């Protein structure tokens, strides 16, 4: 995940402009100063400070563009972002000088983060959100129910998928965590509402969809009809009508559904990028995903 970007003046040792995308929204100024010292000698190599990765690129003269991200984020993807932003920065600098850059820094940077897509997975407790994430990553399903509860109550997965840096927010579904969902609604590109395909949960999920549509107007919303292996599972077409959303059938604890899980994500990305979903074989689909398989 990209936590922040900054335009640095290497000569003056300072941050000229920045954006933050992380949870706390704070810029680690001390670490940036340390990075600047390194960057003066060797900007080509990334540095790790405070558990985050710093990757920069020289734009023009003493101006460098910096991305602060997670250590496991792919250098290749981040360098693509750096190059695209620097090209845009130089164009704006040449046309309107530093004043124009100051006025439009965020709109220069933001479109270049095109390869980052953030998807929120929401739904009632126990419907299978974390199981879906495990399936997506090809991890052995857990039959034991361990509610998503942690200090930060949100687990963030970084997955490189078809050239995208995919950030998945797996929210705890218990009532007490639901207010957290709202805090992230302005940072997400797509929402997946997971239902367990029972009538009872379908009604609750309908309410969730309606409330989220109000809070995140314009953000594409998809639904997963999970637990299709259970005898009382509603048909996805019924759920689709009820939720007014595209519904994908799934059995999240069955690894043979992994391709289906990957197709769901590919479909969402395709619509996000406004391109047609490529026709790929199951083998090709599984080759698209590279994640930290050691993470449980
Ligand atoms: N039969 C069946 N069980 C499933 C399926 N998907 C998940 N489960 C089980 O449902 C339980 C809850 O799954 P989780 O993925 O932890 O649910 P969650 O939505 O993440 O729950 P919270 O984190 O509390 O919001 C676990 O015991 C899973 O094994 C499925 O497709 N079929
Ligand atoms: Mg969970």
Image (cartoon, helix red, strand yellow):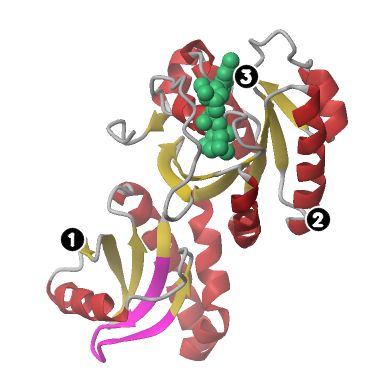
Q: Residue at x 27, y 64 (%)?
A: 54
Q: Nearer the viewer, residue 97 or 279?
A: 279
Q: Secondary structure at mark 1?
A: loop
Figure quarter occupied by ligand 1: top right
Q: Position of residue 240 (x, y in %)?
A: 81, 27
Q: Which mark is residue 214?
A: 2
Mark 2 residue crowding within 10 angstroms, few (<14) / some (14–19) / many (20+): few
Q: Is residue 283 visible?
A: yes
- Frontmost of labels 3 and 1 is 3
Q: Nearer the viewer, residue 127 or 38?
A: 127
12 left or right, relative to 92: left
In the displayed structure image, the side of residue 296 where residue 247 appears, left or right:
right
Residue 45, which numbered label?
A: 1
Q: Residue at x 47, y 63 (%)?
A: 23
How far from the left and from the top, in percent, is residue 173?
61, 42
Give the secondary structure at mark 3: loop
Residue at the outermost left position? 41
User: Alpha-carbon distance for marks 3 and 2?
Assistant: 26 Å
Q: Does 178 appear above or below 6?
A: above
Residue at 50% x, 68% y: name it: 109
Name above or below for residue 94 compared with residue 183.
below
Which stretch did the figure color magenta? 4-17
Q: Quadrant where the N terminus lies?
A: bottom left
Mark pair 3, 1: CA separation? 43 Å
- State the residue at coordinates (71%, 50%): 219
The kind of secondary structure the magenta stretch mainly shows is strand
Circle number at residue 250:
3
**In the figure, residue 224 lies in which quadrant?**
top right
Q: Say whether marks 3 and 2 touch (CB < 8 Å).
A: no
Q: Earlier in the sequence, mark 3 or mark 2?
A: 2
């Amino acid at each position: 995940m990209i936590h922040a970007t900054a335009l640095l003046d290497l000569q003056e040792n300072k941050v000229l402009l920045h954006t933050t995308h992380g949870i706390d929204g704070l810029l680690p100024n001390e670490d940036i100063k340390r990075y600047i010292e390194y960057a003066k000698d060797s900007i080509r190599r990334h540095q790790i400070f405070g558990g985050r990765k710093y990757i920069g690129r020289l734009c023009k003269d003493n101006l460098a563009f910096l991305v602060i991200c997670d250590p496991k984020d792919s250098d290749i993807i981040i360098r693509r972002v750096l190059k695209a932003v620097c090209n845009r920065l130089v164009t704006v600098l040449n046309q309107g000088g530093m004043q124009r850059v100051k006025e439009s820094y965020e709109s220069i940077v933001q479109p270049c983060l095109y390869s980052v897509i953030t998807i929120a997975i929401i739904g009632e407790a126990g419907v299978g959100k974390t199981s879906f994430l495990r399936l997506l990553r090809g991890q052995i399903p857990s039959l034991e129910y361990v509610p998503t509860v942690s200090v930060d109550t949100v687990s963030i997965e970084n997955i490189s998928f078809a050239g995208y840096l995919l950030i998945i927010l797996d929210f705890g579904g218990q009532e007490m965590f639901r207010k957290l969902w709202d805090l992230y609604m302005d940072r997400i590109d797509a929402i997946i509402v997971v239902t367990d395909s029972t009538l009872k949960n379908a009604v609750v999920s309908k309410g969730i969809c309606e409330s989220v549509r109000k809070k995140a107007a314009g953000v594409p919303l998809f639904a997963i009809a999970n637990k299709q292996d259970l005898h009382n599972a509603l048909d996805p077409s019924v759920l689709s009508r009820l939720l007014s959303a595209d519904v994908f059938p799934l059995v999240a604890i069955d690894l043979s559904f992994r391709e289906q899980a990957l197709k769901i994500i590919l479909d969402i990305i395709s619509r996000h990028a406004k391109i047609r979903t490529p026709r790929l074989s199951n083998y090709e689909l599984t080759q698209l995903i590279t994640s930290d398989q050691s993470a449980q």
